[in-house]
Amino acid sequence: MRNLDDVSPGSKARLTKLGGERAFRRRLMELGLLPGTSVRVVRRSATGGVLELEVRGCHVTVRRREASMLEVEPGE
């Protein structure tokens, strides 16, 4: 398993586990980030602190620190 912050821009992955505090996990689920969901890393910010993700047709940004708490497997 690897973390979402290790995925290269343009690549797809499937979420397998959400880590972090309960409130953080709840917020991710509200945004559509659930285990089994396919995500695509669109880009990283110039400073590398933020990732832009495409999830279920919507674009969402997460901090790299937060992305490190999300376990993924290679996607289709």
Image (cartoon, grey):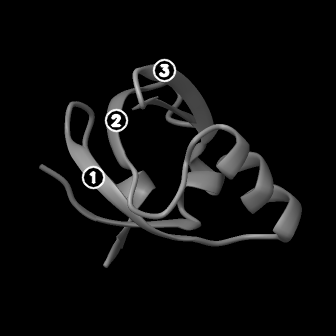
Report the disc number at residue 58: 3
Q: As displayed, is residue 48 above or below residue 2?
A: above
Residue 34, picture quadrant: bottom right
Residue 60, picture quadrant: top right
Q: Which residue is mark 2?
A: 41
Looking at the rendered structure, the kind of residue marked 1 is Ala
Secondary element type, mark 1: strand
Q: As displayed, is residue 6 above or below residue 44?
A: below
Residue 22 % position (x, y):
84, 69
Q: Out of 52 and 23, give the one closest to the viewer.
A: 23
CA gap between label 1 and label 3 equals 15 Å
Q: Earlier in the sequence, mark 1 or mark 3?
A: 1
2 on left or right of 53: left
The residue located at (64%, 54%) in the rendering is 66
Residue 29 % position (x, y):
67, 50
CA gap between label 2 and label 3 equals 12 Å
Report the disc number at residue 13: 1
Residue 33 % position (x, y):
55, 48
Q: Nearer the viewer, mark 1 or mark 3?
A: 3
The residue located at (77%, 47%) in the rendering is 27
Residue 46 showing in the rendered view: no
Looking at the rendered structure, the kind of residue marked 2 is Val
